[in-house]
Structure formats: structure tokens, C-alpha cells
Amino acid sequence: MFHVRLPSMDGKVALVPWADMLNHSCEVETFLDYDKSSQGVVFTTDRAYQPGEQVFISYGKKSNGELLLSYGFVPKEGANPSDSVELPLSLKKSDKCYKEKLEALRKHGLSTSQCYPIQITGWPLELMAYAYLAVCPPSMSKQFDEIAAAASNKSTIKKVLRYPDIEEKALQFILDSCESSISKYSKFLQASGSMDLDVTSPKQLNRRVFLKQLAVDLCTSEQRILFRAQYVRLHFLRFFIFLFKVL
């Protein structure tokens, strides 16, 4: 049996026999769904398959962490365009406006520490808003509520905020957070040693070694996203500083 969410039935979960025989591929867009005409769960391929060729479905646009947690596997590094990693951000207690900022965050359902998903292609507007709030000086206290509202991922209105005067500090705040996370991943990977085992044949591996390899694969893919985010924003920050000096 396999738990399947059916899009045409508002995401209701159904137990579908033999569905677990179909493996996931990040390259396909088709999935199992309920068909009203046949009153059954059907699967329509998105391309032609040759006799004997394995047929794949999509388990959904999930990160590698979600796929590991729900299905017990990690796609090859760089193979999942939907992969993401949670970047933790926190206000500094040494901030002169810590209490005021915390109050603004709580008003919009947030706390002093938040996690936002980042992908190879970028990060959500809410993350940048949180960074703005974290570096806001006391002179911008009137904007705390507006920025905290924009940082709330529960908000249905996506408001793009721009504060040129503190943008450099906000970007540096994000870079520092990336560096902190990268350091933690690096320590784990160094402690794990060199591992490059074939996890497609788990029966041939010791269970403990198999799980450790999956953890290494996940950390490697998430660290890759952090490195990419750090690289892109570092170059953007350097350009921003250069442009500021020229102007």
C-alpha cells in the first residue's frame, strides 16, 4: 500500500495498492490521481515508454529532506530542481530594539528565530524582509510593523520591500547566517569521513551504514544550496558596494 494525495479531490490521501512499485523521478511531471469517469486512481504517462523500460511518476515537488523523511531516499546531488534547505535566522539579543522587534514579529505570528527555505534559484521575499528587520536601526522603529508583516510567510500579500540604506547590512546578515549553517554541515561531513556508497542497493549495505550514507547525501545537497546562495549574494553585495562608491 502507498499513501497518495489526490489533487482532483482537494489533496485527500488514499491507500493505493501497488503504487509503491512506481519510483519517483525529478524529471517527470505526472502523478497518480482520481479519475471520475472510471471511478478509480489512474496514471497517465507524460511521454512514450519503450517495452521493458521503467515507468516513473512524481511524488511531488519536494525537497530532498522531504523525500528522505517520507520515502526513504535522496536524489542524486543536483538532480532535484525542487530541492531546498531551511536557513535559520535570529534576532540578536544585543540589539537595542530587540523587544520592539520581537513584539512586531509576534504580532504577525513569528518569533525571534525563523527558518526560511532557500533554493539554488533564490529565496522568498519573507527572508529578505526578516533580514531588513534584524538590521534595522532605532531610527526606523516606525517601519518595524510593516517589515515584520512582510516577513510573515502566513501573509497572502507578497510585498516587496526595499530599504537601500540598510540593504548592504541585510545582505551581510544573510551571508553570515549562510556561513554559520555551512560550518555546521562541514563539521558533520568531516566527522562522517569519506562516503560514496551506492544506496540504490540497500540490501547489500549494513543498515547503519546505509542510513549514514543517506544523511551524508542529504547534507551534501543542502550544503550545495547554501554555497550557491552565499556565492550569488556575495557577488551581488560586492556590486552593491561598488555601485554605492561610484555614485
Image (spheres, grey):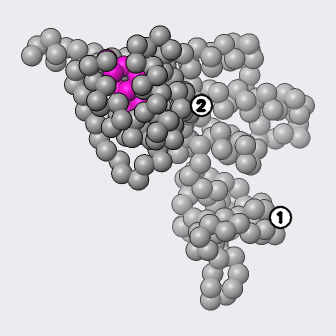
Amino acid type, label 2: Ser
Write down the region rendered in magenta.
Answer: 128-137
Task: Relative to 91, say whether 191 is above or below.
Answer: above
- Which residue is drawn at the image coordinates 54% and 16% (left, top)? 180
Task: Relative to 232, say whether 4 is above or below.
Answer: below
Using the image as rendered, state which of residue 169 and residue 217 is in the foreground. 169
Q: Which residue is mark 2?
A: 221
- Which residue is drawn at the image coordinates 55% and 41% (left, top)? 83
Q: Are marks 1 and 2 in contact (CB under 8 Å)?
A: no
Q: Can the viewer see residue 112 in this picture?
A: yes
Amino acid type, label 1: Met
Q: Is residue 48 left or right of residue 121?
A: right
Q: Which residue is mark 1?
A: 1
Q: Toward which corner of the image does residue 31 lie, by quadrant? A: bottom right
Q: Toward which corner of the image does residue 167 lie, by quadrant? A: top left
Picture coordinates of residue 9 (x, y %)?
Answer: 61, 74
Q: Earlier in the sequence, mark 1 or mark 2?
A: 1
Count residues near mark 1 (Cα–Cα under 10 Å), then give few for <14, some for 14-19, many for 20+. Answer: few
Give the residue at the far bottom of this rendering.
Answer: 37
Q: Identify the secondary structure beneath mark 1.
A: loop
- Which residue is drawn at the image coordinates 66% and 64% (left, top)? 5
Using the image as rendered, state which of residue 87 and residue 108 is in the foreground. 108
Q: Identify the secondary structure beneath mark 2.
A: helix
Q: How many marks?
A: 2
- In magenta segment, residue 131: yes
